[in-house]
Image (cartoon, rainbow, N blue to C red):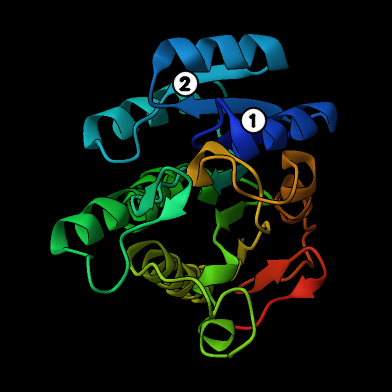
């Protein structure tokens, strides 16, 4: 049975992805910063709970031990993320207001957290016959769209979140090149209504989770080192 860990899985896209993969027969570990929320979510899903704060080394090390004791890991979905610029449903920290502290806070979860978790779980993934890593990125990571007038991405005023997801795409690409035996991809779930954007998204979590679930099950000849949305390859 495929063992899958999803960070930030006690709600939103992570929860829906967990639900779909449990239904597909995966043994799913629901990673959650709050142990009790994670436990309740896992209970609802028929999954396993693991306390996991991607910004905390000790938490990540402890999570590795839990997953290893459970039999190992085949699929890692780096879903946990923050958007610190949001205030009252709007992006209120644009280029004129952004600070190094906001950038640091955002990158700590969205980039450094992904690297911290991926590095820690690499030994388990390398033991798997079909290792997969899915990094949940964003359409705002696309330099092409952010530079194209008339696109929704072009109109986005924030700096930290978009920059963190662009960095995440580079992290994804470099990991994929370093570990060609793995399927490692970034995905753009679309503008999904979640706590991340304070419910302002236009898609449901069911719609947003579609590409995450698909890329969590790519098959041995599936793509790697790519950036994908629901309709296929997404422009870098």
Specify whether 192 is left or right of 147: right
Which of 108 and 87 lies nearest the eye of the viewer?
87
Q: Is residue 161 shown to the viewer in this render?
A: yes
Q: Quadrant of the C terminus?
A: bottom right
The residue shown at (62%, 44%) is 75
Locate residue 67, reporting x and y percent: 49, 26
Locate residue 122, reporting x and y percent: 44, 50
Specify whether 219 is left or right of 148: right
The residue shown at (69%, 11%) is 44
Quadrant hosting residue 127: top right
Residue at the disc numbered 1: 15
Q: Residues within 10 Å of mark 2 (few under 14, many from 20)?
A: many
Residue at the disc numbered 2: 50
Mark 2 or mark 1, whichever is nearer to me: 1
Is residue 71 shown above or below 143?
above
The residue shown at (41%, 15%) is 35
Secondary structure of the residue carrying tag 2 is strand
Which of 129 and 164 lies nearest the eye of the viewer?
164
Secondary structure of the residue carrying tag 1 is helix
Q: Residues within 10 Å of mark 1 (few under 14, many from 20)?
A: many
């Amino acid at each position: 049975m495929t063992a899958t860990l999803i960070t930030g899985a006690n709600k939103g896209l992570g929860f829906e992805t967990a639900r779909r993969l449990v239904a597909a027969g995966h043994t799913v570990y629901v990673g959650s910063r709050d142990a009790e929320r994670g436990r309740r979510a896992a209970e609802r899903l028929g999954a396993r709970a693991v306390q996991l704060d991607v910004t905390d080394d000790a938490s990540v090390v402890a999570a590795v031990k839990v997953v290893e004791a459970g039999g190992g890991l085949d699929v890692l979905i780096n879903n946990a993320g923050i958007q610190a610029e949001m205030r009252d449903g709007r992006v209120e920290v644009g280029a004129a207001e952004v600070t190094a502290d906001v950038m640091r806070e955002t990158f700590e979860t969205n980039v450094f957290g992904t690297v911290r978790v991926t590095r820690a779980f690499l030994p388990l993934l390398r033991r798997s016959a079909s290792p997969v890593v899915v990094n949940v990125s964003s359409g705002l990571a696309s330099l092409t769209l952010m530079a194209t007038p008339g696109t929704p991405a072009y109109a986005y005023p924030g700096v930290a979140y978009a920059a963190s997801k662009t960095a995440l795409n580079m992290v994804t690409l470099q990991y994929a090149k370093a570990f060609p035996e793995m399927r490692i991809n970034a995905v753009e779930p679309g503008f999904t209504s979640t706590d991340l954007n304070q419910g302002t998204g236009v898609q449901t979590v069911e719609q947003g989770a579609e590409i995450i679930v698909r890329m969590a099950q790519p098959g041995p000849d599936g793509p790697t080192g790519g950036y994908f949305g629901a309709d296929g390859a997404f422009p870098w």
